[in-house]
Image (spheres, rainbow, N blue to C red):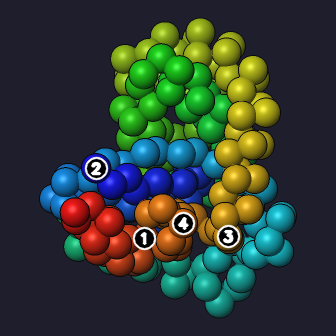
Amino acid sequence: MATLEFFYDFVSSYSYLASTRVEAEVAKVGGTVRFRPFLLGGVFNSTGNKAPIEVAAKAPYLVKDCARWARRLGVPFAWPPKFPVMTVLPLRAAFAAERHGKLVPYTHAMFRAYFAEGRDISDAAVVADVATGAGLDGAALVAEAPSFKEALKVQTQEAVDRGSFGAPTFFVGQEMFIGNDRLDFAIEALAAAGKP
């Protein structure tokens, strides 16, 4: 069974949009999806890329484009009142959630908290509360998060080494696709990879 790797950061609006449909799209072609959190700021630092929000002409377009996508996908979306935020804590906690077998529900809950509910996911109390809502011991998860500092760095560097320069990044084998609007191409590659 072919696998699609989904690299994302909770600060990425396009990663949120992709997260709302990636599992269903992958299931349609009989593949599997592997959720892989990474630090987008680290990717930008390594590649010299910039967040769209940092480019004056792109910022207002980004907000409108994400709202358009959300309407098309039928998913809740509200631009967070505090944007961007530091996501190191929720990302490290994602590795802890993975260790407890709850990475996917934790990921969906964290994206919803930020891009649908406007909560400040850089706040430890918010991270703990969101994690608890995803079926984890939130306080314990936040306490455990710092031990995954190196794991986050390694996974981020892996994505960079494989060619990533933004989020979301999808890989099917060594073939890379970047952006929510490239997910369909990634699914096509996944379907082809799964054929005998």
**Residue 180: which disc?**
1
In this figure, which residue is indicated by the disc labeled 4? Answer: 174
Q: What amino acid does circle 4 point to? A: Gln
Q: What amino acid does circle 1 point to? A: Asn
Q: Are there few (<14), some (14-19), or many (20+) residues within 10 Å of tag 2?
A: few
In x, y percent, where is residue 162? Answer: 67, 64
Comes first in the chain, label 3 or label 4: 3
Question: Quadrant of residue 101 in the image?
Answer: top left
Q: Measure the alpha-carbon separation of dots 4 and 1.
A: 18 Å
**Extreme-bottom residue of the structure:** 57
Q: Is residue 59 above or below residue 191?
A: below
Determine whether the residue tagged by mark 3 lies in a helix, strand or loop: loop
In this figure, which residue is indicated by the disc labeled 3? Answer: 163
Comes first in the chain, label 4 or label 1: 4
Please name which of the two marks, 3 or 1, marks the residue nearer to the observer: 3
Q: Measure the alpha-carbon separation of dots 2 and 4.
A: 16 Å
